[in-house]
Image (cartoon, rainbow, N blue to C red):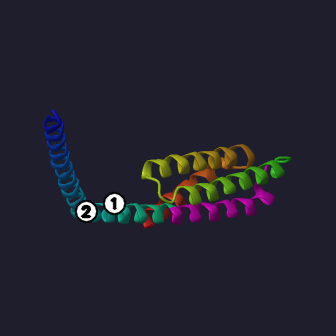
Amino acid sequence: MDDNISFAMFIACSVALALYMQIQRLTKNIDANEANEKPSNTRYKISQQENKSAKYIAFCDIIDEKIRELRAMADDMAIDGKKDEFLENLSQISKKLTFVQTMNTNSDTTKWEAELFEILERIENLVSLNLKDGESINSKLRDSLRDEFKNL
């Protein structure tokens, strides 16, 4: 009976060793395949993402420049009594733009576009409500930003 237990233990250990070696070999093959495939794809995706992020970051800088131009217009073009509110809202939009620019550096284009669309929509509404001849200013701003974005 002692021999049967010893023989069963030997068989169990042999099977465990064979199973362990098969798992190690399989894991090594999977790791080797991933190592061969991923770096080129990952580098390409990272490179594309960095290029797109750089484009959107540059566009954020252009939008911030336009916000500064709108601040300068506030003295002459603001509707009576709305100048302070207009400047405060522009300041908040500028802070939001900086936040978006910082937090989205590794985000995909849909996230960038959604955030920038929201900011541009807020600027457009703000100009319409607080500046004299707001529609004309918005039209010029839209055209200018569209041209700037195409040039990036």
Between 141 and 92, the one lying in front of the other is 92
Tally of numbered tags: 2
Mark 1, secondary structure of its residue? helix
Of the two numbered discs 1 and 2 on the same chain, state the one appearing first in sequence. 2
Q: Which residues are magenta?
A: 57-79
Q: Depth check: give the residue in front, 10 or 89.
A: 10
Q: What type is the residue that disc 1 sits on?
A: Lys
For marks 1 and 2, give the CA distance: 16 Å
- Residue at image point 78% right, 54% down: 87
Element type at marker 2?
helix
Q: Which residue is mark 1?
A: 45
Residue at 19 percent across and 41 percent down: it is 9
In which quadrant of the rendered view does residue 13 lie? top left
56 relative to 88 in the view: left or right: left
Image side of residue 140 versus residue 131, left or right:
left
> Does 73 sit above or below residue 82?
below
Quadrant the C terminus occupies: bottom left
Image quadrant assignment for residue 46: bottom left
Tell me the residue that label 2 is attached to: 35
Q: Amino acid at mark 2?
A: Ala
Q: Residue drawn at (57%, 64%), measured in percent from left and top?
A: 62
